[in-house]
Image (tube, rainbow, N blue to C red):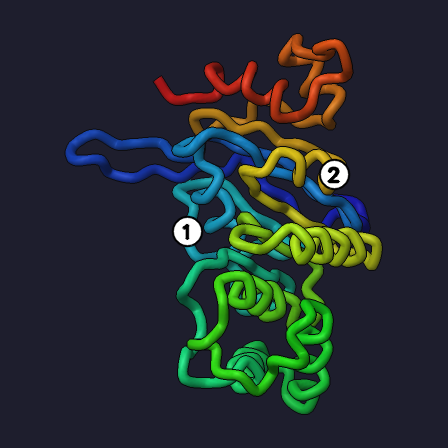
Amino acid sequence: MNQTTVLQVVRLRRMFQNGKTPFTAVDDLSFSLEKGSIAALLGPNGAGKTTTVQMIAGYLAPTSGQVLVCGEDCTRSREKTRRKIGVVFGGELGFYGRATAWENLMFFAALAGLGKQRRAEAERVLKAVSLWESAHQRVGTFSRGMRQRLHIARALLGNPELLLLDEPTNGIDVELAHELRALIRRLAEDGAAILLTSHTMSEVEHLADRILLIGAGKLVHDGNLESVRALSKVTHIDRPATLEESYLALSPMLRRE
């Protein structure tokens, strides 16, 4: 592993028991992610994307294989690696609704072991996601978009080397989504390695410098927009094909039988 490699996924496999029949959700998956890069993990529902992200985040143990963050095995050094990973799954859960945004972040900053840095970190991340003016508002009164921004703020606590973003702009209006994409790019420019999932292909097209196509738990393709176009054989439709058009051409081969 070179000095700029933040994430290494090595022959990762996860099996579940589906009645009496074992089901392989992720099958011998390997890839790496470098400092300052943004990679998108794409595939149809049931392809294994969420299971992969959950294993990288340490929420789900792999059946076999390894996840290394900055050279540390996530299974063997869970506490050490957890502080190097920021995770955004979004949704309505994850915060104390009767507490303010500030109180929530101070609590999670304490859990992250930030100690005396808690106040400065809570202020920094709230400003980063444009929630500073709502810092003392109860989270239970937040709109869906505000909650999503708060999820991102929580993930940024402690300046983690690896960010896992699952649908980071889901439920957010167009203007704010544009601001958050700019923030994601700045985080990568500052050195974070970012792995994101998104159903918004235009978002992936503008953000990701690498595209990882996953189908039936296996890595089908690792490349960029041009290589995905070439693989799909949909390169021009009276203009260069969009990622969405190329992806739709490939989607049948990515689905489980």
Callout 1: helix, strand or loop?
loop
**Can residue 230 be spotted in the picture?**
yes
In the image shown, does 35 or 78 lie closer to the viewer?
Answer: 35
Pick out the residue farthest to the left.
Answer: 20
From what the image shows, is residue 145 above or below residue 36?
below
Callout 2: helix, strand or loop?
helix
In the image shown, does 141 or 206 lie closer to the viewer?
Answer: 141
Name the residue at 68% across, 73% down: 125
Percent coordinates x, y for residue 173 in the rendering: 60, 54
Percent coordinates x, y for residue 255 in the rendering: 42, 21
Pick out the residue farthest to the right.
Answer: 189
Left or right: 94 as drawn, with respect to 135: left
Give the Cα distance between marks 1 and 2. Answer: 32 Å
From what the image shows, is residue 242 above or below residue 200?
above
Name the residue at 59% across, 41% down: 9
Q: Which residue is mark 1?
A: 61
Q: Which residue is mark 2?
A: 206
Q: Quadrant of residue 249?
A: top right
Name the residue at 66% across, 11% down: 234
In the image shown, does 128 or 36 lie closer to the viewer?
Answer: 128
Q: Local crowd at mark 1 within 10 Å, few (<14), some, or many (≥20)?
A: some
Amino acid type, label 2: His
